[in-house]
């Protein structure tokens, strides 16, 4: 990813664009073909260009001057009718397309890891949580299936952003083609694999670029969401998952016992950085008239950084999930830690089915649930002693309401919707057991 935005690669793209434009001029008879052939021998010298830029204060001028020193008279055919932004914006489009291809590969790798672990943990019972409080039973595989579905959407967003930014311009100083034949633009951009921006000023409108960077920020937000879940599940009081932790890794300079979720925390911090870059891209949309240069300095930072950061974040998240230790027994123990109140809705619905009003049934179940929570007692025992419950539910019927398998009975539907195998795999010994045993 860094190579895409390196000075050497940028100059190579500029040269490629300049040469393809000369081919277009030759096609319509404006440049002699032998000169085009000689121009193809041109080579860029990044260090020389950098030295020239220090003197002239303009990167494209320095680039052209450097070429002119080695090309002689043929250099006059370069940059014919173009303005600097023709080269800069077209090259940036090529860079962002290449960056998107890397990000798509990263998403595919992460999705494959999430997919595999979702199948492995399909039946791993745990407490679902809303507001951080126990809600109803879910499975860890179900949670991962949700992550996979979100990654599928993020992939499509990157595909859309890639296509949106895949536009170039070779239309001259203010976009009117006064000095560049539109046929040259069309031929050159077709060879570069870019669409023609229908209307431009001196630059391509920055809504394309804002949409691209905003997409990167949204993808980063999904990674932050996954990382936040992992951080919460690794808390000492929860201890249901653990990030990978190297044999010689240390979590604290002062406390040897510390094993902190630093990788997930890192992703959260970097997601904020990418969001900040997206804000800059949004502010770069409003340029003065046909163009000013206020966006240029910012874009030299935000695009290389944001693309490299998201590349790193996607790879890091794949490593985290690949090496995540999952303590299944701890998950089950935590599910019952609240005295079984996670089954309260089933009791409520059963009482309503037996003829109680929902309001009366709610009061009975809530009173029993809060007593169990406050006093550390067993919810099933307390609610079973309520006269309203004894009148309507047999001991067997009440016991059936506390079967956690009930909550997973429709998982096949969810898994099939996201393209996962509906049948649970046998638990892997490497990841099962009380210690979690994960890789």
Image (tube, rainbow, N blue to C red):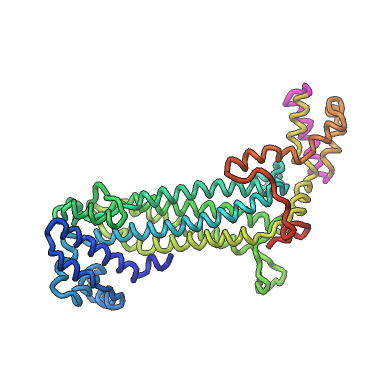
| Figure quadrant of residue 253 | bottom right
- Image x and y of residue 95, in percent: 36, 60
User: Residue at position x 37%, y 69% from top?
Assistant: 6
- The quadrant of the rendering that contains the N terminus is bottom left
Position of residue 127 relative to residue 16, above or below, is above
Q: Residue at x 34, y 54 (%)?
A: 284
Residue segment shown in magenta: 354-376
Residue 220, given in percent of the width and then of the height, sits at: 50, 55
Q: Is residue 346 left or right of residue 283?
A: right
Whether the magenta-drawn stretch holds residue 98 is answered as no
Q: Nearer the viewer, residue 367 or 30?
A: 30
Tell whether 322 sits left or right of 179. right
Q: Please state the horizontal and vertical placement of residue 59, each as a whole percent of the image.
A: 26, 69
Q: How many marks?
A: 0
Identify which residue, 84 or 167, lies in the foreground.
167
Q: Is residue 218 above or below residue 364?
A: below
Q: Is residue 230 visible?
A: yes
The single residue placed furthest to the top in the displayed view is 355
């Amino acid at each position: 990813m860094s190579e895409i935005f390196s000075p050497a690669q940028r100059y190579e793209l500029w040269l490629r664009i300049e040469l393809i434009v000369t081919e277009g001029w030759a096609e319509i008879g404006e440049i002699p073909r032998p000169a085009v052939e000689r121009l193809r021998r041109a080579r860029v010298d990044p260090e020389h260009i950098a030295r020239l830029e220090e003197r002239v204060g303009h990167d494209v001028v320095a680039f052209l001057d450097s070429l002119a020193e080695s090309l002689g008279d043929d250099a006059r055919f370069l940059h014919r009718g173009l303005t600097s932004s023709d080269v800069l914006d077209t090259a940036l489009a090529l860079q962002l397309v290449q960056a998107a291809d890397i990000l798509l590969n990263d998403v595919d790798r992460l999705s494959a890891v999430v997919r595999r672990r979702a199948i492995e943990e399909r039946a791993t019972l745990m407490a679902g949580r809303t507001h951080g409080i126990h809600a109803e039973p879910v499975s860890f595989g179900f949670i991962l299936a949700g992550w996979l579905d979100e990654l599928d959407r993020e992939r499509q967003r990157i595909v859309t952003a890639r296509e949106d930014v895949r536009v170039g311009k070779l239309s001259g100083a203010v976009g009117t083609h006064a000095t560049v034949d539109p046929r040259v633009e069309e031929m050159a951009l077709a060879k570069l694999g870019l669409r023609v921006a229908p209307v431009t000023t001196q630059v391509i409108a920055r809504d394309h670029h804002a949409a691209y960077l905003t997409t990167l920020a949204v993808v980063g937000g999904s990674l932050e969401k996954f990382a936040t879940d992992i951080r919460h599940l690794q808390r000492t009081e929860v201890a249901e998952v653990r990030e990978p932790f190297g044999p010689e890794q240390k979590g604290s300079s002062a406390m040897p016992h510390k094993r902190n979720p630093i990788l997930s925390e890192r992703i959260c911090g970097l997601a904020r950085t990418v969001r900040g870059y997206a804000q800059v891209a949004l502010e770069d949309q409003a340029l003065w008239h046909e163009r000013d240069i206020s966006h240029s300095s910012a874009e030299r930072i935000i695009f290389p950084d944001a693309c490299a950061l998201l590349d790193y974040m996607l790879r890091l998240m794949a490593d985290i999930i690949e090496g995540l230790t999952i303590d299944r027994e701890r998950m089950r123990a935590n599910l019952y830690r609240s005295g079984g109140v996670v089954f309260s809705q089933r009791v409520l619905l059963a009482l309503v089915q037996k003829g109680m009003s929902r309001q009366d049934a709610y009061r009975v179940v809530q009173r029993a649930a809060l007593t169990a929570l406050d006093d550390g007692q067993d919810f099933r025992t307390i609610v079973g002693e309520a006269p309203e419950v004894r009148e309507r539910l047999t001991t067997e019927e009440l016991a059936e309401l506390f079967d956690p398998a009930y909550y997973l009975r429709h998982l096949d539907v969810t898994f099939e919707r996201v393209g996962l195998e509906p049948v649970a795999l046998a638990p892997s010994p490497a990841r099962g057991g009380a210690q979690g045993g994960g890789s």
